[in-house]
């Protein structure tokens, strides 16, 4: 009877802890390093109605989401990748709900990328920062904004001026009649061809008559401008500037024969797990495995990275520092997304 009661209590406690973890809400924050504005789309649903440079999405319950970031500036590439809101957030080495922060910035090639900035225990996120847009996660599409109709009225005012015929010039009257619309054109021109070359402008007067009544008179002044282009030829040929050849990337080589001892490895693993920021954790991990590790030891280190992208980057880096990297393919089952497995496989095929 006591054994049955003890088992029942253990089951209730475990179930309560599981439900508590599942019910605990997570927060995902996205911000652009250089202030570019964007929309956040989680699992195919747009979260913020207006583009913003800093978006916090609250009320997340799932351990992972598919996120797409679309920038207001259409010249910037979109970002489409998976994120996790659960992982190792302390030294207990237990997977727990987390509040995650992602930074959007351009890499060395000018491509916009998303990098993990922080991974903290759920509920530790502070109040919204200034100019930060906070939205509650929703699964229904946002309502479409009402269309805005803009009416533009353009008013054109024409000033008519009658110029007298200058001495030495003649006036030519042309009248055109079409369906009751009479158009009278008066063109002022020089008396001779020699005067035409020196004439800076020509005045044209147009009278518009409808059913015999003058409705308006317009004078148009045209000016003729002659432009002469002189091309200068340099008879001395300048030698083309000497260009330096592109630097050749130095190939990294590493000869690992013996892996670090079990004691040294445990110390290194503990130091890595203590780091709160993903960037610091990555730097210490890279420095630690320079002492050479086994594939089995890499299996213990990879789960320390909560961000899938960091896990993949560390796996690629550790290949050259693993004594038995012929077994490296066995690490594929540590990744949550098939795209990461495909990328690691492609990397190993190129080795």
Image: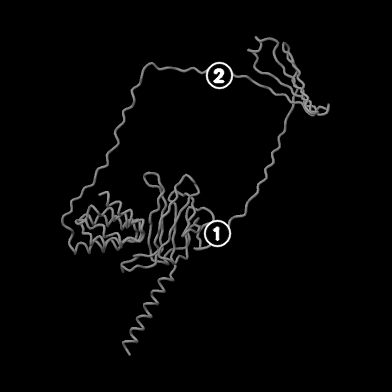
Counting from the top left corner in percent of width and height, residue 216 is at 78, 28
Point out which mark residue 142 bears: 1
Q: Residue at x 30, y 56 (%)?
A: 282
Is residue 5 left or right of 160 when viewed as pictured? left
The quarter of the image holding the N terminus is bottom left
Counting from the top left corner in percent of width and height, residue 307 is at 36, 59
Q: CA distance from mark 1 to mark 2?
A: 59 Å
Q: Which residue sits furthest left?
A: 258
Local SS, label 1: loop
Q: How many marks?
A: 2
Is residue 141 left or right of 150 when viewed as pictured? left
Counting from the top left corner in percent of width and height, residue 16 is at 40, 77
- The one nearer the camera, 326 or 237, is 326
The residue mark sitting in front, 1 or 2, is: 1
- The one nearer the camera, 152 or 128, is 152
Q: Is residue 179 above or below residue 334?
A: above
Q: Which residue is mark 2?
A: 227
Q: What colour-coding does the image apply?
A: one colour
Q: Is residue 158 above or below residue 274?
A: above
Q: Residue at x 76, y 18 (%)?
A: 173
Is residue 127 left or right of 338 when viewed as pictured? right
Is residue 38 left or right of 240 when viewed as pictured? right
Counting from the top left corner in percent of width and height, residue 339 is at 36, 56
């Amino acid at each position: 009877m006591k054994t049955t009661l003890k088992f029942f209590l253990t089951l209730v406690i475990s179930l309560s802890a599981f439900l508590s973890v599942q019910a605990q809400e997570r927060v995902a924050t996205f911000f652009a390093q250089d202030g570019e504005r964007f929309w956040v789309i989680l699992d195919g649903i747009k979260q913020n109605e207006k583009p913003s440079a800093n978006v916090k999405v609250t009320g997340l319950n799932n351990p992972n989401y598919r996120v797409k970031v679309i920038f207001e500036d259409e010249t910037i590439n979109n970002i489409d990748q998976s994120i996790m809101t659960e992982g190792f957030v302390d030294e207990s080495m237990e997977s727990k709900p987390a509040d995650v922060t992602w930074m959007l910035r351009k890499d060395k090639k000018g491509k916009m990328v998303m990098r993990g900035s922080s991974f903290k225990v759920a509920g530790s996120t502070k109040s919204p920062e200034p100019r930060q847009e906070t939205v509650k996660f929703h699964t229904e599409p946002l309502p479409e904004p009402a269309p805005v109709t803009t009416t533009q009225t353009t008013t054109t005012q024409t000033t008519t001026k009658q110029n007298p015929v200058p001495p030495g010039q003649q006036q030519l009257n042309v009248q055109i009649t079409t369906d009751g619309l009479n158009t009278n054109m008066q063109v002022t021109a020089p008396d001779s061809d020699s005067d035409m070359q020196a004439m800076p402008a020509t005045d044209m007067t147009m009278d518009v008559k409808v059913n015999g009544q003058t409705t308006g008179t317009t004078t148009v002044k045209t000016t003729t401008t002659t432009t002469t282009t002189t091309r200068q030829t340099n008879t001395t040929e300048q030698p083309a500037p000497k260009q330096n050849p592109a630097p050749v990337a130095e190939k990294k080589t590493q000869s690992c024969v013996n892996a670090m001892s079990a004691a040294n490895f445990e110390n290194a693993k503990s130091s890595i797990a203590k780091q709160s920021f993903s960037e610091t954790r990555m730097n210490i991990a890279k420095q630690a495995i320079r002492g050479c590790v086994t594939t089995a030891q890499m299996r213990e280190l990879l789960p320390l990275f909560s961000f899938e992208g960091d896990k993949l980057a560390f796996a690629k880096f550790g290949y050259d520092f693993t004594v038995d990297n012929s077994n490296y393919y066995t690490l594929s089952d540590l990744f949550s997304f098939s795209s990461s497995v495909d990328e690691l496989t492609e990397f190993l095929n190129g080795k």
